[in-house]
């Protein structure tokens, strides 16, 4: 019998620290072109990506000069409350209601030495402000490595043992 995902036992401040530190590290890496710190913050499986490889993966965001530093001061709206997946990873998803572009994120963290370390990052920007849902009962996506949405730039990185992450 397969285990089901279950709510994570993590407080609000812990969640905010994980989300903000990850997205700010990505934002700074995109601004400087130096992905060493982002890579070093990750789990050993995420570190299977070289800093140069991460630079290639995030080249589109860097070229577009996307800035999502607003995550430092805005409160995220979670669309997927922190949960532990059957594989033991912490999974969080949501958005920052910024204008003109809304920062959407989905993050996976792997437990390493009693700390959550970045394993998967998915970020895309869409038009900010209130929008009607596509369908009344639409559920948010469950995985971080789905294809990019048609209406905004998207990047997903999720390392797998023995392989390099590639552009989705």
Image (cartoon, grey):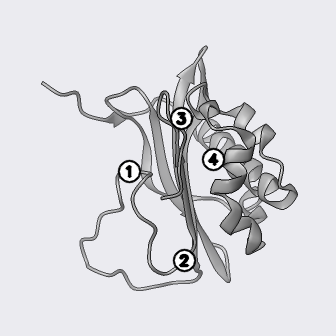
Percent across and percent down for residue 112 are: 58, 19
**Cβ–Cβ below 8 Å for labels 4 and 2?**
no
Q: Earlier in the sequence, mark 1 or mark 3?
A: 3
On screen, residue 137 above or below 31? below
Q: Residue at x 71, y 33 (%)?
A: 41
Q: Please report whichever mark, 3 or 4, sits nearer to the chain's N-terminal start.
A: 4
The kind of secondary structure element at disc 3 is strand
Q: Which residue is mark 1?
A: 143
Front one among 156 and 161: 161
For the residues labelled 2 and 1, the Cα–Cα distance comes to 18 Å
**Mark 3 surroundings within 10 Å by alpha-carbon count, few (fewer than 14), some (14 through 19), many (20 or more):** many
Question: Residue beneath label 4, please?
Answer: 19
Circle 1 packing at 10 Å, graded few (<14), some (14-19), many (20+), is some
Say which residue appears at 30% left-offset and 64% top-offset.
139
Residue receiving disc 3:
109
Numbered disc 2: secondary structure: loop
As helix, strand or loop, the secondary structure at mark 4 comes to helix
């Amino acid at each position: 019998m397969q285990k089901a995902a279950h709510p994570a036992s993590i407080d609000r401040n812990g969640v905010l620290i994980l989300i903000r530190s990850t997205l700010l590290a990505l934002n700074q890496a995109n601004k400087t072109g130096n992905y060493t710190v982002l890579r070093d913050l990750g789990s050993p499986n995420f570190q299977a990506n070289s800093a140069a490889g991460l630079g290639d993966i995030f080249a589109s965001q860097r070229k577009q000069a996307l800035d999502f530093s607003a995550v430092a001061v805005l409160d995220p709206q979670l669309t997927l409350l922190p949960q532990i997946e059957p594989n033991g990873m912490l999974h969080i998803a949501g958005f920052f209601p910024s204008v003109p572009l809304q920062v959407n994120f989905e993050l996976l963290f792997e437990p390493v030495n009693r700390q959550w370390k970045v394993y998967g990052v998915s970020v895309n920007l869409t038009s900010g402000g209130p929008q009607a849902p596509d369908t009344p009962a639409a559920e948010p996506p469950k995985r971080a490595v789905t294809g990019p949405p048609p209406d905004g730039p998207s990047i997903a990185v999720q390392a797998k043992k023995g392989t390099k992450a590639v552009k989705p």
